[in-house]
Image (cartoon, grey):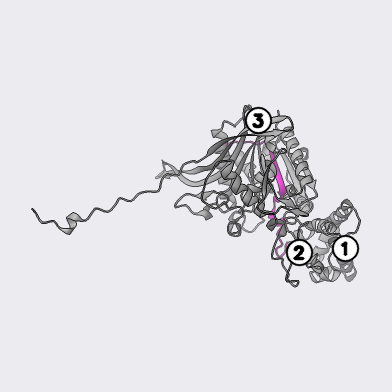
């Protein structure tokens, strides 16, 4: 028998295996919801769809390369005519936030019970039917941008490639195009609903979808609107936010009893007039402001905001928003919420300049996280071992605005362009008086400067609520907002 060598007996190395090609993993489930005497039968589809990019090699088409898996949940009413049935694409903001807030707080057929300021819901939390759901009036598609929810890049792709203004618009726009095409909805009335940074995204998407895909919208719902970051960012040389936040400061001070028994409307009228005229003038005067003028400005600003005159004077008439939330109730040992100034929390360090906790987030995020993680598995029947990223601070802090070097981050021109090209485009703006993140007076300022002909201003409507950033946490506001959005869908569907 011939002698064998080590080379002959050593097994050949195993061939390298490539990762499996990513595939859509949508799961379909059937549901019903009774609203008064009407039974809604609807289909839910939830899971991830694969986004692909076209590859050109030496100028020749070389296929489609997977680049990301984006998580979405859609609800479509059974037996509805897709040619007349509206569809709304919804997302939240951050950037870095999943769509869980609008999905489970306001629009979806099931909702989280989070409680409110006076009665926060304790763990382990609850879900309930939502008889005010927008599904009664429009099909719904909730989109989680890359790195939020269960959305992730595919193997070999970089998350940061999606963490910026333009790539975000392009990827979310591609999800909308794909869903519209795959579900035969190009002739349906189409809407966007965005909250917070999602309003900036929605305004830019309206232009992008028109220009890139010829997809024209019927309406946009801007919830807690910020279309120009320059109106809310307290940066050196930018005095605008110091004025635009004053009516919100006054509203929060009023809520916490610092305006006595004066009606809120009266307080806001005084604050708006001061913020529109006297304060901007005083700030731009700088050292040219006389002693008498400065004293009067300090007195009025302190009276409106509930702050001490000495604090206003030391702050050089410029009250930064987080400082306000920390200072306004300092004598009670409390800080107010940023997202919703009605909320308060005890501050163990009474000398801190900046609050350490936003109670308007920490008091409700547990209910939303637990509620959705339960709901997606037990009712929507979707399984995924990834953590569901509700709100990623890592994404938020690394977000790229490289498109806006040397200028304010803004989608104002995009919205104006979309409305000029599509004169039937309607815009609904929802604003909370106690929203300290995207103040209502700043949104009004932006809309007043929108470059559209006068006749198109009739296409914009605004709704105000005695609540904060997520105004639907306040039950009367949630019910009213649901009615307002349903009426907007009906009026803007052009049927």
Q: Residues within 10 Å of mark 2 (few under 14, many from 20)?
A: many
Any magenta on residue 385?
Answer: no
The residue pinned by badge 2 equals 335
Q: Look at the numbered disc 1 and give the secondary structure of its residue.
A: helix
Tell me which numbered mark, 3 or 2, is placed earlier along the sequence: 3
Tell me which numbered mark, 3 or 1, is placed earlier along the sequence: 3
In this rendering, the label closer to the viewer, 2 or 1: 2
Q: CA distance from mark 3 to mark 1?
A: 51 Å
- Quadrant of res 274: bottom right
The residue pinned by badge 3 equals 85
Any magenta on residue 234?
Answer: yes
In this rendering, the label closer to the viewer, 3 or 1: 3
The residue pinned by badge 1 equals 303
Q: From the viewer's perspective, is 318 left or right of 18?
A: right
Image spot of residue 245 (x, y percent): 78, 58
Magenta-colored span = 213-238
């Amino acid at each position: 028998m011939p002698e064998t060598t080590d080379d002959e007996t050593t097994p050949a190395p195993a061939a390298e295996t490539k990762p499996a090609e990513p595939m859509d993993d949508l799961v379909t489930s059937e549901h019903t919801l009774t609203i008064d005497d009407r039974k809604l039968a609807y289909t839910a589809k939830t899971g991830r769809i694969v986004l692909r990019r076209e590859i050109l090699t030496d100028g020749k088409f070389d296929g489609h390369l997977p680049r990301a898996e984006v998580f979405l949940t859609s609800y479509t009413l059974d037996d509805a005519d897709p040619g007349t049935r509206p569809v709304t694409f919804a997302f939240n903001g951050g950037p870095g936030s999943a769509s869980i807030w609008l999905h489970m707080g306001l629009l979806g057929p099931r909702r989280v019970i989070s409680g409110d300021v006076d009665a926060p819901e304790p763990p382990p939390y609850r879900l309930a039917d939502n008889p005010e759901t927008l599904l009664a009036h429009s099909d719904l598609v909730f989109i989680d941008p890359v790195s939020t929810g269960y959305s992730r890049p595919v193997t070999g792709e970089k998350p940061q490639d999606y963490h910026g203004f333009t790539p975000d618009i392009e990827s979310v726009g591609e999800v909308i195009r794909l869903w519209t095409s795959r579900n035969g909805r190009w002739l349906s009335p189409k809407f966007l609903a965005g909250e917070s940074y999602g309003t900036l995204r929605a305004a830019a998407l309206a232009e992008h979808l028109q220009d890139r895909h010829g997809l024209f919208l019927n309406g946009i719902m801007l919830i807690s609107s910020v279309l120009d970051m320059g109106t809310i960012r307290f940066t050196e040389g930018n005095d605008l936010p110091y004025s635009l936040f004053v009516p919100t400061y006054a509203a929060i001070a009023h809520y916490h009893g610092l305006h006595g028994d004066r009606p809120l409307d009266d307080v806001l009228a005084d604050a708006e007039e001061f913020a529109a005229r006297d304060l901007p003038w005083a700030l731009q005067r700088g050292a040219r402001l006389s002693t008498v003028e400065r004293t009067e400005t300090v007195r009025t600003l302190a009276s409106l905001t509930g702050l001490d005159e000495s604090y206003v004077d030391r702050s050089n008439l410029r009250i930064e928003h987080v400082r306000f939330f920390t200072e306004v109730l300092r004598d009670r040992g409390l800080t107010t919420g940023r997202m919703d100034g009605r909320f308060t929390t005890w501050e163990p360090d009474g000398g801190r300049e900046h609050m350490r906790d936003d109670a308007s987030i920490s008091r409700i995020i547990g209910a939303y996280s637990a509620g959705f993680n339960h709901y997606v598995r037990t009712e929507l029947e979707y399984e995924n071992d990834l953590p569901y990223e509700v709100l990623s601070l890592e994404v938020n802090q690394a977000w790229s605005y490289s498109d806006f070097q040397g200028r304010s981050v803004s989608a104002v021109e995009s919205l104006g362009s979309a409305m000029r090209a599509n004169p039937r485009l309607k815009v609904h703006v929802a604003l909370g008086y106690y929203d300290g993140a995207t103040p209502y007076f700043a949104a009004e300022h932006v809309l007043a400067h929108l470059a559209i002909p006068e006749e198109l201003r009739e296409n914009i409507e605004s709704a105000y609520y005695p609540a904060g950033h997520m105004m639907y946490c306040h039950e009367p506001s949630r019910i009213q907002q649901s009615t307002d959005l349903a009426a907007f869908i009906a009026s803007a569907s052009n049927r």
